[in-house]
Image (spheres, helix red, strand yellow):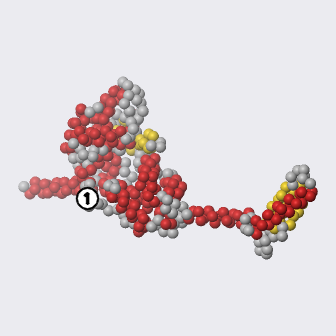
């Protein structure tokens, strides 16, 4: 039965402490009932009896618990709620916030696109613990049937694996179901692109440079500089005039201009996080000098490549659109800025440049990356070395 005790606050306010014992091993529970002003003693006692009776009922029904017990209940509910996260809740609340601390804006934007378009609409409402290897395999197979390229299917596979690997590591799921999902294989009708097809030959590059003589000066400089240095698209768009050293005929690659729908155009460091110095030919330098004079007649900008009639930098997506149309005009299928980067490296290695120097020139953080990407060029230079030996033996024999 509930017991009551009359008490007063420091400022003289009257109240009653109502206590209910719950038996051995459980602490008593209490609540305070403050007496309204102006009530008669008879009314107060009648109302106190009602309040005490209701409080006792709640205690016996388990509707009232101690603070310590409430903390324990809250902790259990939180733990249970964590186990009941859907793929969408986990991807948006844990996976992406973690990724955003280390990824570039472009990478974040790309991941969000895959999530919003290809993952969450299909399995977002499924609880993490209910996702099976079969569900994930079907999602990847359906994606491939929709006609997406093999590389995109691999990207989807990697993102899904990243989500469930993270969920496994933080105990949100008992195992990573992606461990039982096969990596996407290339479709029968999807032709593999040979590495040698990712670069132009010297003859093709010369034809392109001749064709560019009839193109706007800005694009002529862009193509010439890309082929000469092997710089990335964003590095070219982020090039300052102050980064060009006319005396040593070199450019210092300090910036990488990027674009994302959320952030717009923004500057970041080169891909490996390090600045590098790359030499350029006299013809490329002459074209740069011409472009600087042309640019000065309309605007002053710190950027080499700007929007037409504006000091603002060129959108890094503009070269991709221009190259696509340029390829249609001059007979280079699927032409994109990166093709000139591949071409620059391939021509260098094929004609005797050592891989370490090419790797540093390209800004690769690991020489192994260069070796893997341009193995076809290295093989050709090795064959050429063999022919040099054979030719030398012939001369000596004669």
Q: Position of residue 217 (x, y in %)?
A: 29, 31
Q: Nearer the viewer, residue 16 or 51?
A: 51
Res. 337 image quadrant: top left
Q: Percent x, y for residue 291?
A: 33, 30
Residue denoted by label 1: 189
Quadrant in which the C terminus appears: bottom left
Which residue is most to the bottom?
24
Q: Residue furthest right?
A: 41
Left or right, 89 with reference to 224: right
Disc 1 secondary structure class: loop
Q: Is residue 259 above or below residue 32?
A: above
Tell me if residue 324 can be seen.
yes
Image point 41% across, 55% down: which residue?
118
Closest to the observer: 79 or 345?
Answer: 79
Residue 219: x and y, percent? Answer: 30, 35
Which of the pair 236/247 is nearer the observer?
A: 236
Quadrant that contains the N terminus: bottom right
Tell me: 388 left or right of 231.
left
Residue drawn at x 88%, y 63% is 5
User: What residue is rendered at 44% in x and 48% in y?
Assistant: 109
Identify which residue is drawn at 73% across, 65% down: 63
């Amino acid at each position: 039965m509930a017991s009551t005790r009359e008490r007063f606050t420091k400022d003289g306010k009257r109240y009653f402490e109502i206590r209910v014992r719950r038996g051995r091993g459980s602490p008593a529970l209490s609540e305070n009932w403050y007496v309204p002003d102006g009530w008669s003693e008879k009314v107060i006692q009648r109302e106190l009896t009602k309040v005490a009776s209701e409080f006792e009922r709640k205690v016996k029904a388990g509707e009232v618990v101690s603070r310590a017990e409430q903390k324990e209940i809250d902790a259990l509910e939180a733990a249970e709620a964590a186990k009941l996260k859907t793929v969408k809740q986990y991807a948006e609340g844990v996976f992406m916030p973690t990724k955003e601390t280390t990824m570039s804006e472009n990478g974040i934007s790309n991941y969000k696109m895959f999530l919003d378009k290809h993952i969450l609409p299909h399995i977002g409402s499924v609880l993490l613990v209910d996702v099976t290897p079969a569900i994930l395999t079907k999602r990847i197979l359906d994606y491939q049937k929709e006609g997406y390229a093999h590389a995109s299917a691999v990207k989807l596979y990697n993102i899904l694996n990243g989500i469930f690997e993270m969920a496994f590591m933080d105990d949100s799921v008992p195992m990573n179901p992606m461990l039982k999902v096969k990596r996407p294989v290339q479709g029968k009708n999807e032709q593999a692109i040979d590495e040698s097809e990712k670069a132009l030959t010297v003859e093709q590059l010369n034809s392109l440079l001749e064709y560019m003589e009839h193109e706007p000066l800005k694009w002529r400089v862009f193509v010439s500089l890309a082929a000469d240095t092997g710089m990335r698209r964003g590095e070219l768009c982020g090039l300052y005039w102050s980064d060009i050293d006319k005396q040593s005929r070199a450019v210092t690659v300090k910036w990488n201009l990027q674009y994302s729908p959320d952030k717009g155009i923004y500057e970041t460091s080169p891909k490996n996080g390090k600045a590098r110095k790359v030499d350029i030919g006299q013809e490329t330098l002459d074209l740069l000098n011409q472009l600087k004079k042309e640019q000065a007649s309309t605007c002053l900008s710190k950027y080499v490549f700007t929007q037409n009639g504006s000091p603002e930098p060129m959108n890094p997506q503009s070269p991709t659109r221009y190259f696509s149309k340029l390829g249609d005009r001059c007979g280079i299928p699927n032409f994109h800025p990166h093709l000139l980067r591949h071409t620059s490296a391939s021509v260098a290695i094929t004609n005797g440049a050592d891989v370490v120097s090419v790797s540093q020139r390209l800004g690769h953080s690991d020489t192994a990356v260069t070796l893997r990407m341009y193995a076809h060029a290295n093989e050709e230079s090795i064959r050429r070395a063999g022919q040099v030996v054979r030719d030398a033996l012939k001369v000596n024999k004669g």
